[in-house]
Image (cartoon, helix red, strand yellow):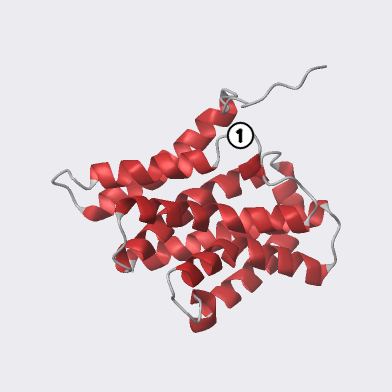
């Protein structure tokens, strides 16, 4: 039940971030729904295909489609209030990667994969919906910029497997790892921490 709630919350967070990007690009209603949809389920779809979980999750359980549809309607009706928060897109995107990193890791564990593979799946689940969203909206995906994004997912995944070794409830480790991902992303943006460039462009 706990993991299902986290999955739904991640879907809502990413759907809202997709709606905000789509509205910035002044897309029509159908376009807004499509961008919200691919943002919310794009990473999970890739993950399920890689581990052979087909039909993919949102095709097996229509609740995801209804949740995304409801989120789109909610975000459109309250778009003016959302726009008052200058960093609302960043906030929902950050919450989404924290939640979805752990959803992906959980799916990897269920498939019997090694921890490193689970972390890779978690990073994919968290990142690739945003990649598809940005590409469709003609933006350079955040994951390919200097910002700490996928790195936060990886560090959160590592922290999860380290915390699990402690004599504590697994639910706490799960929640703590989500906080780690969100915290690293927030700190990186607040203090302008970025990965170094591997090249230098002469001017």
Residue 177 vertical placement versus 31 (above, below): above
Classify mark 1: helix, strand or loop.
Answer: loop
Q: Tell me if I can see residue 69 in this picture.
A: yes
Q: Residue at x 65, y 73 (%)?
A: 69
Q: Residue at x 46, y 36 (%)?
A: 183
Packing grade of label 1 (10 A; few <14, some 14-19, many >=20) is: some
**Snapshot quadrant of residue 78:** bottom right
- How many marks the image carries: the answer is 1
Q: Nearer the viewer, residue 160 or 65?
A: 160
Position of 87 with respect to 122 (left or right) is: right
Q: Nearer the viewer, residue 188 or 202?
A: 202
Position of 54 with respect to 73 (left or right) is: left
x, y (%) of residue 101?
A: 45, 53
Q: Nearer the viewer, residue 117 or 150?
A: 117
Q: Residue at x 36, y 62 (%)?
A: 108
Question: On the rendered image, what quadrant is the N terminus found in?
Answer: bottom left
Q: Residue furthest top?
A: 203
Question: On the rendered image, what quadrant is the C terminus found in?
Answer: top right
**Snapshot quadrant of residue 23:** bottom right
Position of 58 with respect to 203 (left or right) is: left
x, y (%) of residue 132?
A: 67, 58
x, y (%) of residue 33?
A: 72, 69
Q: Tell me if I can see residue 79 in this picture.
A: no
Residue 71 vertical placement versus 124 (above, below): below
Label 1 belongs to which residue? Answer: 147
x, y (%) of residue 173?
A: 28, 48
């Amino acid at each position: 039940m706990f993991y299902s709630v986290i999955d739904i919350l991640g879907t809502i967070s990413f759907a809202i971030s997709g709606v905000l990007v789509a509205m910035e690009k002044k897309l029509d209603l159908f376009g807004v729904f499509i961008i919200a949809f691919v943002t919310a389920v794009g990473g999970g779809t890739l993950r399920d295909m890689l581990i052979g979980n087909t039909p993919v999750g949102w095709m097996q359980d229509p609740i995801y489609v209804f949740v995304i549809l409801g989120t789109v309607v909610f975000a459109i009706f309250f778009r003016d209030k959302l726009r008052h928060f200058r960093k609302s897109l960043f906030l929902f995107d950050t919450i989404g990667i924290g939640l979805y990193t752990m959803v992906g890791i959980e799916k990897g564990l269920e498939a019997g994969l090694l921890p490193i593979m689970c972390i890779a799946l978690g990073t994919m689940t968290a990142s690739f919906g945003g990649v598809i969203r940005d590409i469709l909206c003609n933006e350079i995906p955040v994951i390919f910029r200097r910002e700490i994004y996928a790195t936060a997912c990886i560090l959160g995944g590592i922290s999860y497997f380290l915390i699990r070794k402690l004599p504590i409830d697994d639910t706490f480790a799960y929640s703590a790892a989500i906080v780690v991902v969100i915290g690293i992303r927030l700190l990186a943006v607040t203090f302008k921490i970025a990965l170094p460039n591997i090249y230098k462009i002469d001017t």
